[in-house]
Image (tube, helix red, strand yellow):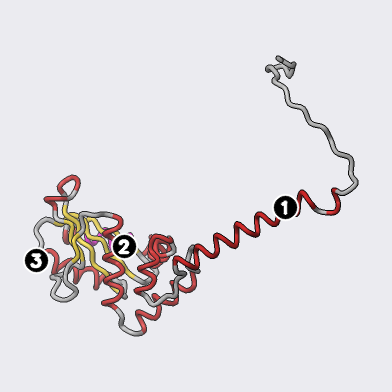
């Protein structure tokens, strides 16, 4: 069962309003780990620029990746994370910036160019739209709970499935036992095998 889009968006807005960056960091790290199991979460304080790190030694292609999460999105914030990352990690080739803000591809384009020129990193931006889509996946209901979103329990889902099954059975029974069929002529149906020309083959 998917969580309504607006509930997730409202929860993300609340995080920013209440400075809930630690909560979003936890959600962002969980999302990135489910995408790529080579990512290792960093401690929430003193992370030296990254919230999760996929060391080059265990990453496909031997290219290290770093992830930084933020409730804000601008080149200054990304550059600040990149400066600390460059100083403390020597194996990073890809920097993933995850934010609750809307960031269009048009906005991203100059950021990607400048981060590449200044730090040599390939910048990937995951903005609000992508976060919401991923959180709507039923497999990520636990992450919605971290955001304080009310989610259906397993019992709710089972009850819903049972109710749907009962309703479907009643509908099917009604179709074949309803009054309009009473007193109507019945057709005798016979099946047969036919060839490509539609002729009976026996």
State the separation of the CA atoms marked 1 and 3: 70 Å
Say left or right for 129 vs 177. left
Q: Earlier in the sequence, mark 2 or mark 1?
A: 2
Q: CA distance from mark 2 to mark 1?
A: 45 Å
Q: Mark 1 near mark 3, Cβ–Cβ under 8 Å? A: no
- Of residues 28 and 157, the one nearer the viewer is 157
174 up-or-down from 42: above or below: above
**Is 37 a magenta residue?**
no
The label shown at residue 31 is: 2
Name the residue located 72 percent from the left edge and 52 percent from the top edge. 173
Residue 173, disc: 1
What residue sits 23% from the left and 67% below the top?
Answer: 68
Asked whether the beta carbons under mark 2 and mark 1 sit within 8 Å of each other, the answer is no
Residue 76, position as x, y percentages in the image: 24, 72
**Looking at the image, is mark 2 or mark 1 nearer the viewer?**
1
- SS of the residue under disc 1: helix
Q: Nearer the viewer, mark 3 or mark 2?
A: 2
Q: Secondary structure at mark 3?
A: helix
- Calculate the distance from the C-alpha at mark 3 to the C-alpha at mark 2: 26 Å
- Magenta span dominant secondary structure: helix
Query: What's the magenta region?
Result: 108-115
């Amino acid at each position: 069962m998917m969580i309504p889009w607006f509930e997730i968006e409202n929860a993300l807005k609340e995080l920013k309003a209440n400075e809930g960056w630690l909560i979003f960091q936890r959600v962002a790290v969980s999302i990135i780990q489910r995408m790529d199991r080579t990512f290792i979460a960093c401690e929430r304080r003193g992370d030296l620029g990254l919230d999760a790190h996929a060391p080059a030694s265990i990453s496909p292609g031997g290219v290290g990746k770093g992830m930084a999460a933020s409730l804000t999105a601008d080149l200054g914030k990304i550059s600040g994370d990149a400066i600390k990352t460059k100083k403390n990690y020597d194996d990073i080739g890809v920097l993933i910036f995850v934010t609750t803000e809307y960031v269009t591809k048009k906005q991203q384009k100059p950021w990607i160019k400048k981060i590449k020129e200044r730090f040599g990193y390939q910048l990937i931006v995951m903005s609000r739209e992508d976060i919401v889509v991923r959180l709507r996946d039923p497999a990520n209901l636990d992450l919605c709970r971290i955001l304080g979103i009310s989610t259906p329990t397993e019992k709710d889902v089972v009850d819903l499935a049972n109710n749907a099954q009962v309703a479907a059975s009643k509908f099917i029974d009604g179709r074949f036992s309803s009054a309009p069929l009473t007193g109507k002529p019945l057709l005798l149906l016979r099946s047969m095998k036919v060839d490509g020309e539609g002729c009976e083959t026996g």
